[in-house]
Amino acid sequence: MTMEEIIIDKVTVNIGVGEGGEKLEKAKKVLALVTGGNPTITKVKKINREFGIRLDQPIGVKVTLRKEDIKKFLDSALWVKNFKGFAYSFSTQGTYSFGISDYTDFKGMKYNPEIGIFGMDVVITFRRKGGYRVSKRRLRPTKIPEKIRIKREEMMEYMKKNYNLEILGVD
């Protein structure tokens, strides 16, 4: 049974700024403050001439949290959301996503006029203890079979049990 146990693989927190420069550096400061992690710059992977986006242009920042950092961050992030989430935020691919509109909503954070207001997206990625390797191994990687994939209901149950998340709008 332990191989079928669901665990949180990682939590990714990102801020999309849309441009480089000073605004990007401020977003980096915000992520470092909120998560305690070391933010990395995300770059454009596809060109879009209509928006004036070039290849490899810095456009946002992100932090990936793993292991011990996950619990501390999720407790504070879900506190901001009043431990409530929507059922449609759970995907069929093993993720749960939600947004936080302002970093000052976190406990102990005060508005800093030098930084401004930044919101962020939080993506929680789930996996099973066993069966994860088939998609990540070097030789013959394959898609994760249907019987090993995590279903929406299982993720919802995990979040209810471990984080007391109240799920709204359940189908």
Image (cartoon, rainbow, N blue to C red):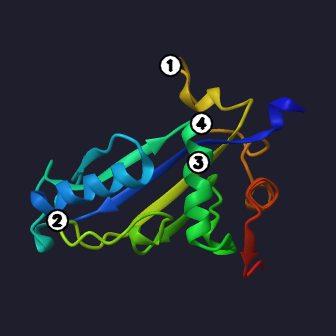
Number of other residues with Cα within 10 Å of mark 2, as a class: few under 14, some 14 to 19, many 20 or more: few
Answer above or below: position of 141 versus 26: above
* Marks 1 and 3 close (CB-CB < 8 Å): no
Left or right of 152: which side holds 14? left
Q: Circle 3 sits on which residue?
A: 72
The disc, 2 or 1, on the residue closer to the chain's N-terminal end is: 2
In which quadrant will I find the C terminus? bottom right
Q: Circle 4 sits on which residue?
A: 68
Number of other residues with Cα within 10 Å of mark 1, as a class: few under 14, some 14 to 19, many 20 or more: few
Q: Circle 1 sits on which residue?
A: 138
Farthest bottom residue in view = 169
Closer mark to the observer between disc 4 and disc 1: 4
| Kind of residue at disc 2 | Asn
| Kind of residue at disc 4 | Glu
Answer above or below: position of 66 versus 126: above
Indicate the position of residue 68 as horizontal and vertical percent values.
59, 36
**Structural distance between the alpha carbons of marks 4 and 1:** 27 Å
Answer above or below: position of 17 versus 37: below
Q: Circle 2 sits on which residue?
A: 48
* Marks 3 and 4 close (CB-CB < 8 Å): yes
